[in-house]
Structure formats: C-alpha cells, structure tokens
Amino acid sequence: MKKNITLIFILFVTFSFGQKKEIKKATKLFNAGDIQGATDLLESSASLFEVADAKNLNKKTYLEAQIDQANKNFSAAFEKFTAFKAANGVNANYDNQVQLLTSDIVNSAIEDNAEKRFSEAAVKLYLAYQINPEVNKDYLYYAASSAVNATEFEISLSYYLKLKEINYDGITKQYLAKSVATGEDVELTESEFDLYKKTNDYSDFREESTESKLPEIIKNIALIYVQLGDNEKAMAAVKEARKDDPKDLNLILSEANLYLGLNQNERFEGLMKQAIEQDPNNATLYYNIGVVNAKAGHVESARDYYEKAIELDENFESSYLNLVSLILESESPIREEMEGLGRSSADNKRYNVLTKKLDDLYKECVPILEKLISISPKNDGAINTLMNIYGTLGNTEGYKNMKKLLE
C-alpha cells in the first residue's frame, strides 16, 4: 500500500512538473508574439492537464484568456479571466490585463462603428460594460446607441431600460479655458487644467458639467416603443419624456403619430401645429396635417396645407398628387348628377353647367400635374392622370405627349 502511495505521489509530481514546463514554454512563445505556436502547444498537451492541480490549471486558463484577447475573441477571453478569478487564481498583472481587455474591446467597437458594423459594435460595447458594470456605465449607453443604428430596436430598448433603471445620467466634468492666441475655448484634461493655470497662454479657466443624458434616454425609450408598435407603453414613455422637454420636435411628432394611429385626429392636428411652431419651414409637417384634414373632409384646410407644403418644398411630389386627388374628389358628385338628368330644356342647361364645372376641375389640375411631371418625369401615375385629362379636354397634342412619356 505504501508502495502504491509513493508511486501515485511520483506520478503526480511528474505530471505537475510537465504541466509547469508546458505552460512555461507556451508563455514564452506567446510573449515572443508566436500566438499560434502557443495555441498549438496548449492543444497538443491537453491530455496532460486533465489531472492538473488548481495552480497549474489557473495558469493555463490565464494564458488561454490572453491568447483569446490577442485573437480578438473578447467574449471568450472575458469568460476565462472570470473563471480564473472565480478559481482564486493569482496573477499580479490581472487587474491591468482586464483593463487592457476593456480598452481592446472598446477600440474594436470604435472601428466597427466607423465601418458601420453597428451590430458587432453593440455586442462589444455591452461586453465592455459587463466587465465592470459600476465603472463602465458609459459603454452601456454607447451600446444602446449602436444597437439603434443597427435597427436592433428590442436590444437597444433593453439597454436603455437598464440605463433608466440604474439612473444613469452620463454627466461629466469639463475643464475649459480660452486660448490667448486664438480667443477660442479649448477643453483640457484635469492635469492640463492645473498646469496651464501657471502659464500665460490661457485665460478664463472654468469647470463645467455636461448636461444629463437621462432625458435623452427616456426619449429614446419612447421612440423605440413607437417603432415597435407598442402604443400603450409608447404613449406613457412619450408623456414622461415630454415632461422633461415639452418642445422636443421628435417627441411631439411621436405623440402626434400615436394619436393618429388611435384615430384621434383632433389631438394629432393640435400636436402637429405645435410641431410647426417649433419648425415652421418643415414642409412634411404641413403635408401631414393636410392628410388628416382631407380624411376628415375639411377640403379647404387640406388644400391650404398641401399648397403650403409645396411652397416650402417645390419638389414635394406627394403634396402635388394629394392636391390633385383633393380637387378631383368633386368629380364624382358632378358626374352622378349629370347621369341623373333627363332630356328637358332645363336639364340640358344644367348638364352644360356641370360640364363646364368638370372642365374647370380638370383645367385646375393641369398646371399642378405639369409641374409635378417636370420635377419627376418618370411618375407614371401623374403622367397617366394628365393624359386622361388632356383627352377629356380635347388637347390632342398634350395627350400624345403624355402617351409618349408612358411608352
């Protein structure tokens, strides 16, 4: 029995020595920049570590984490560093290494955003936040923004809700001074701020705090709920956001659109008028109010809004088309009355009056459609409508020209 114990002890010592040797060799390769060589060595000696003691296994885990970090397998690296720490692993450089991992992740995310790989950037920034949630709250905020850019609204919503839950405001202290040479304000680091006070190159030194990002976060939550079609939560979030910023144009429009979806047209129009007060030269706002008025049967008001939209933006195709449609709405009742007339002298006179009314309607549409076609020569709907109007009015040349355009 004693002999067996001695043999097991010898084998254990032998394995432990072999493990240390392999880790040392792999570490040397890694430090020399041969990452693949270190990887291959650890893989080839995997069976040796099946009976590794905790100390050697931790060393191996730490090295594998470094290899994953070097290969930009950031999630795997973080998992291994976490496992190393959970197993009571000890390495004097651990904190610096994890801080370096965070920097590598963020820098990679910055590259992704620059190349419009927003989804990848969001994943990385969220990982950077998870590494140290107390310190890295800013990265959760930027992860939410990248997810929005990737149109991954449910993911971005979860991030923004988390930011709201932890009451993140993103307020930072800015150190500002005025350059004597240029007269312009410059932002300094805290150390520069203290140092430059002793020179004559800067003046008007001051410390300022940035604005809170919390109102923006609440606004984005509301807008995402709108995007996702959750009207009930969207309405609650919009109203909460508007308490902080009642004049925010996007929030006004979001609330207006919610009321439009609920067929509360009066509230919609009221909010759109508020929006126009904020942005009086926005043609789209006038157009949208025109649409609602047209649906409500307020023909003259709708016409005024469509014409105002065209006045502000002469290339606003939808306003031209809707204006023509609005004018031609009077066509049906006129034709119905014409069809109901008899053959008496009075009916014939009335028929002539109605015929002139129809012609006047068509003539009113001609310059609108001509203008539209001049700015959009491939608008088949406008061309076809004008061709039919020319045909009705007996304008043979105009009819042929429109037919050529269609062909």
Image: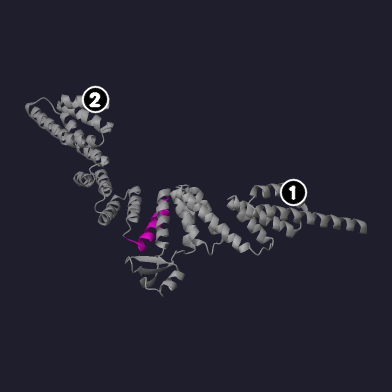
Rounded to the nearest angstrom, the CA distance separating label 2 from label 1 is 79 Å
The vertical placement of 30 against 94, above or below, is: above
The vertical placement of 313 against 172, above or below, is: above
The amino acid sitting under disc 2 is Lys
Residue 271 seen in this snapshot: yes
Counting other residues with Cα less than 10 Å from the Cα at mark 2, is it few (<14), some (14-19), or many (20 or more)? few
Highlighted magenta segment, given as a residue range: 229-246
Residue contact at pointers 2 and 1, CB within 8 angstroms? no
SS under mark 2 = helix
Residue 125 seen in this snapshot: no
* Residue at 20% over, 24% down: 400
Question: Which residue does the numbered mark 2 point to in the structure image?
Answer: 404
The amino acid sitting under disc 1 is Ser
* Residue at 41% over, 72% down: 196
Q: Magenta-highlighted stretch: main secondary structure?
A: helix
* Residue at 41% over, 49% down: 227
Give the side of residue 346 with respect to residue 39, left or right.
left
**Quarter containing the C terminus:** top left
Query: Residue 45: x percent and y percent?
Result: 74, 48
